[in-house]
Amino acid sequence: MKSPRRTQSPGPQWPSLGAALAYLAATCVFVLALVVASSAVVALVRSPQPTVADPARSAPHWVNTWTSMPQLTEPGNMPPAPFTGERAVLVDTTLRQTVRVSTGGERVRLRFSNAFGTTPLPLTAVTVALPLDGRAGVSAVEPGTLREVTFAGRRSTTVPAGAQVVSDPLDFGLRPATNLTVTTYLANGQASLALTSHPGSRTTSYLRTGDGTAEQDLTGATPVNHWYLLSDVEVLAGRDTRAVAVLGDSLSDGRGSTTNGNNRWPDQLLDRLRGLPGGGRTAVLNQAAGGNRVLNDGLGPNALARLDRDVLAHSGVSWLIVFEGVNDIGTAEATSAAQQRVADDLIAAYRQIVVRAHAQGIRVHGATLTPFRGNTPYDDPAGLRETTRQAVNAWIRTSGVFDAVVDFDRAVRDPADPGRLRADLHDGDWLHLNPEGYRTLAAAVPVSWFTKS
């Protein structure tokens, strides 16, 4: 027999030169990746603050500087004859309005709303100017300040039913807390009586037949204390300019304030902010309307329905003050069951408002509801509505749902009778405030909310 062949163990197998180079390259890539990843981790841990040269911080942005809550115009608030016809409104009409902006800028643009229109809204021509002597509610403008507004480069535009239109940016310097005149001409008017407006303007506007957009004064014009069609003014401002919006009812819309006085509490809050370092970079947007409610439609859609349009969609909003709910309590039946239901529903609605605003990065501040004892028809003999107001206020103060709370109730109630307003602060109906009452509300708001970096 032959001995079996002995198999020799192979010696070390050296790779080819190409394989060695490939292995070396892979190793270098892996090490480089570790270095890059390590550098990224270090950068994240150090979290350096952007410098002023960072375009994301230094680039200007659009901020709302004035706004009004759009509403469907009621018959009693329609333009007077001859500006309202049987089937159309504002035909061959010039409308001149003044609005008080909150923060300033060198470029402006306007928004016109047809939110409640059932037909298109054709705007033939629009101009802006500074009002004579800077005053609110005047029909004349300062000579040499009239400027034409365009839309996609054109003088005219049409706002579709239910929509809004934004003008082209216009080089037009505005100082904070000053008045702006906007003049609009409608050759054909709106072919229905479904007109979008803000009746509670507390500011005088003017109507006249024919195109007066280029005129210094609307001689012979008809005065009306309403705003029509115009819903927003925006300014191009630095990134540190931001806005606080107010969601409210007649107590924020200013019933009891002075016509052309701009002394609602949001106006007086703006005046306080202007006196502080950096306060001129905070816009105050009043999105309130008389009779408005949180839960149900009244004068205008309910607050839950209009939150997106009136707050979340606005430019530059960083804060929201919610001061609304007294009309829900006052119009609910004065029974224990109905009042318990409205209290529970209001609390649930406040939670919804906070959740939806927080999703947009907006801080939400709650305001307690002010007294109404002695008011007809809100005060009831058994005090059931007052019990509801107290329960809702206790929740606002203690729930922790709001980012912060301003106690308007404590600011204006009678210390000797907490269910009533102080006698010197209301306008005679024990519900609405006078200018001094609105000053007291404005003074209660912690301005540190809006002046911190």
Image (spheres, rainbow, N blue to C red):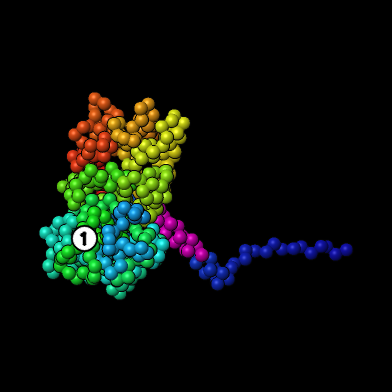
Q: Is residue 204 visible?
A: yes
Question: Residue 8 is drawn in which quadrant?
Answer: bottom right
Residue 282's x, y, as percent?
24, 51
Q: In the image, what residue type sits under mark 1? A: Thr
* Image height of 171 relative to 403, above or below: below
Q: Position of residue 402 (x, y in %)?
A: 36, 40
Res 20 quadrant in image: bottom right
> Residue placed at 31% from the left, 35% from the top?
376
Residue 150 appears at what percent x and percent y? 28, 71
In the rendered image of this protein, does residue 264 appear above or below residue 143? above
The residue positioned 31% from the left and 48% from the top of the image is 288
Instruction: Give the overall secondary structure of the magenta segment.
Output: helix
Q: Is residue 210 left or right of residue 35?
A: left
Instruction: Classify mark 1: helix, strand or loop.
Output: strand
Magenta range: 26-44
Q: For this rendering, which residue is in front, 234 or 3?
A: 234
Q: In the picture provided, is 160 more to the left or to the right than 139?
A: right
208 part of magenta stretch: no
Whether residue 31 appears in magenta in the rendering, the answer is: yes
Q: Is residue 216 above or below residue 48?
A: below
Viewer-nearest residue: 328 or 37:
328
Q: Is residue 164 visible?
A: no
